[in-house]
Image (cartoon, rainbow, N blue to C red):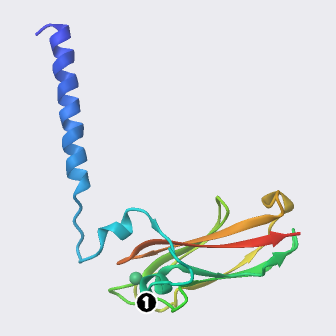
Amino acid sequence: MDRRDFLKSAAVGALSMSVATGAFGAERSYPVSVDPGLFESINRVKDPANKTPLEKSHAPFITAPAKVKAGEPFTVEVSIGENLHPMGPAHWIGFIELNVGNEPAGRVDFQPKGYLKPKATFTVVLPREAAPKGKVTLIAYQRCNLHGYWEGTRDIEVV
Ligand SMILES: [Fe+2]
């Protein structure tokens, strides 16, 4: 086999391997029955005026002042969701993460025993640079072991 034939067969081999990996990767198996679609992207409330029961119990609900002063601490509470999500060994929230726009601010991890309710309180201080246009979006994420990744947002004014 000359060098050219070797390179051709190596390229074909690499291509068929990546096709096989891609096909295999598209099919996923889970230990319990879940909707795989909930784990493929971040879920959000589609129509805030008509939330589904799944959205009501999974979308992070952020409570924060509508207007804050730059450099002064304020309280942000994140609960999962409007109807507090259950916490137990078979169905639980793994974490709550708070972001200031695209910047991670903090995170609370939960264990499946159910000792804690899926709620976290953060004391936040925003420097003026965090809100160059006078407002900022707080973004909270959570992960449910059966219902995937969820996002909730709240815009606040920073003066
Ligand atoms: Fe859930």
Quadrant in which ligand 1 is drawn: bottom left
Q: Amino acid at mark 1?
A: Met
Give the crowd class for mark 1: few <14, some 14-19, many >=20 residues within 10 Å.
many
* Left or right placement of residue 43 versus residue 20 in this view: right
Per the image, label 1 sits on a secondary structure element best described as loop
Residue at image position (20%, 51%) is 24
Extreme residue toward the left, this view = 1
Q: In the picture shown, does residue 101 fall above or below 116?
A: above
Q: In the picture shown, does residue 11 fall above or below 123?
A: above
Q: Give residue 31's position: percent from left, percent from top.
A: 23, 73
Q: Is residue 73 visible?
A: no
* Left or right placement of residue 86 versus residue 5 in this view: right
* Left or right placement of residue 95 versus residue 32 in this view: right
Q: Is residue 138 visible?
A: yes
Question: Which quadrant holds the N terminus?
Answer: top left
Residue at image position (45%, 84%) is 52
- The part of the image, by quadrant, that contains residue 79 is bottom right
Q: Give residue 30's position: percent from left, percent from top.
A: 24, 70
Comparing 69 with 125, the one in front is 69
Residue labelled with disc 1: 87
Q: Give residue 140's position: percent from left, percent from top.
A: 59, 72
Question: Which quadrant holds the C terminus?
Answer: bottom right
Number of labels in the image equals: 1
